[in-house]
Image: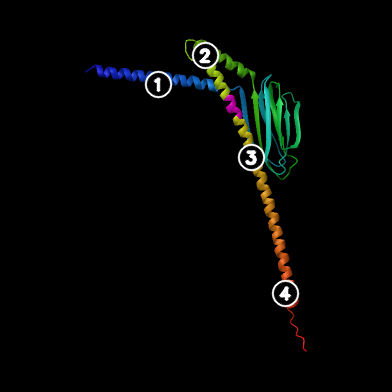
Amino acid sequence: MKEEPLCLLDQLMMTASAQLLLMGCLTLTVGLALDLGPNQIMEFTFMLPAGGTECFYQTTWTSDTMEIEYQVIAGSGLDVGFALISPTGYRVVSEFRTSDGIHMVDPTEFGDYRLCFDNSFSKLSEKMVFFKVTINSPRNTAGGQEELADIIVSESGVDYRLEEIRGRMDTVYRHLEKSRQVQTMLRAFEARDRYLLEDNLWRVSFWSCLNLIVVISVAITQIYTLRRLFDGTKRVCT
């Protein structure tokens, strides 16, 4: 009668051990997935006031690669001025009244790059601007390789092929990251197209209503004039 509780206790301990082992494997998998991506991506959408200028700062290290994409989503004219200034004060990019642009800086300098959007030429209309900064750092890639090598050395007795798993997870991550970037740009294009459609719809509706009012006014005036010609009050005696 005393062996049954012991067997039940052994089963519970084995179940708990299996759960801990599974949690450990999942933690290792998640850690590998988080350390795969060498890219740092920052996205931001903001309102640029009329007649104003907004600047943003991005810190980079030496020999990094920085890609900047921006697009004006809404606002009269759909254009802004853009300037990219290096940490040493050199103006890398200077554009005036453009609706979108893609710029690459390779390699970068150590310090803070300044991204400035200018709307000083428009005194009445504010602009909605979307921009994305992608930084590719070789240091992050090297760090991930070293950490993976340490894991492989420390787990040399494990039967799993960590290198193959890491390669496949890296491929999946790159594909997912590329898909996310494309979807972000498509959302920006969709927002811009929707704004243009709504603005054109308002213009078409306004001028259509104005033309309709003019046509109805002319028709009423003509009918009134013709009726006055035949509504004479004088009678002619014969």
Mark 1 or 2, nearer chain start: 1
- Give the mark nearer the N terminus: 1 vs 3: 1
Amino acid type, residue under disc 4 in the picture? Arg
Whether the residues at callouts 3 and 2 have beta carbons within 8 Å, the answer is no
Closer to the N terminus: mark 4 or mark 2?
A: 2
Amino acid under label 2?
Ile
Query: Do the CB atoms of the residues marked 1 and 3 lie less than 8 Å apart?
Result: no
User: Where is mark 3, residue-wise?
Assistant: 190
**Callout 2: 10 Å neighbours few (<14), some, many (20+)?**
some
Q: Residue at x 76, y 28 (%)?
A: 91
Badge 3 or badge 2: first in the primary sequence: 2
Numbered range of the magenta stretch: 173-178
> Which label's residue is closer to the chain start, 4 or 1?
1
Of marks 3 and 2, the one in the foreground = 3
Q: Nearer the viewer, residue 177 or 53?
A: 177
Q: Give the number of the disc on residue 151.
A: 2
Q: CA distance from mark 4 to mark 3?
A: 55 Å
From the viewer's side, name the closer residue of 71 and 219: 219
Residue at which label 1 appears:
19
> What amino acid is labelled 1 in the image?
Gln
57 to 63, vertically: above or below: below
Seen in the image, is 35 located left or right of residue 13? right
Q: Residue at x 63, y 17 (%)?
A: 139
Within 10 Å of disc 1 (Cα), the crowding (few <14, some 14-19, many 20+) is: few
